[in-house]
Amino acid sequence: MKTVELIVRDGCGSCVRVERDIRGVVARAGWDFKVIDTADDPEIAGEFGDRVPVVLVDGEEFACWECDPDELAHALL
């Protein structure tokens, strides 16, 4: 299954907003959606640090800090 991952950090308001904005887009496209907190994975924390939220589409970085839902929907076609 194709996967969209959202890299977040606890207490990050932008992370909450981006998750809210893209969760439905991903669901409508029929893709799997995973939220990964940097606190739960030291490797992820080392790679992304404070540069969150980050949206990965099938492991490739799609967006950082902001994610346009319409652009994401188009990319998931």
Image (cartoon, rainbow, N blue to C red):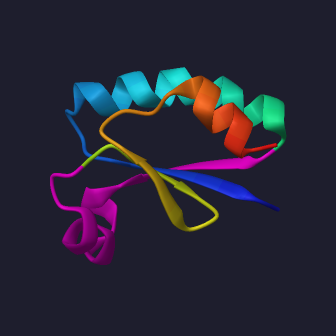
- Compared with 13, 41 (above or below) is below
Q: Residue at x 60, y 33 (%)?
A: 71
76 and 32: which is toward the camera: 76
68 and 38: which is toward the camera: 68
Q: Residue at x 25, y 59 (%)?
A: 39
Q: Which residues are magenta?
A: 31-51
Magenta segment includes 19: no
Q: Residue at x 68, y 57 (%)?
A: 3
Q: Quadrant where the C terminus lies? A: top right
Residue 41 percent coordinates (x, y): 33, 69
Magenta segment includes 33: yes
Q: Residue furthest left?
A: 50
19 and 39: which is toward the camera: 19
Residue 65 percent coordinates (x, y): 30, 38
Q: Residue at x 77, y 47 (%)?
A: 31
Residue 51 percent coordinates (x, y): 21, 52
Q: Quadrant where the N terminus lies? A: bottom right
Left or right: where does residue 55 sit relative to residue 31?
A: left
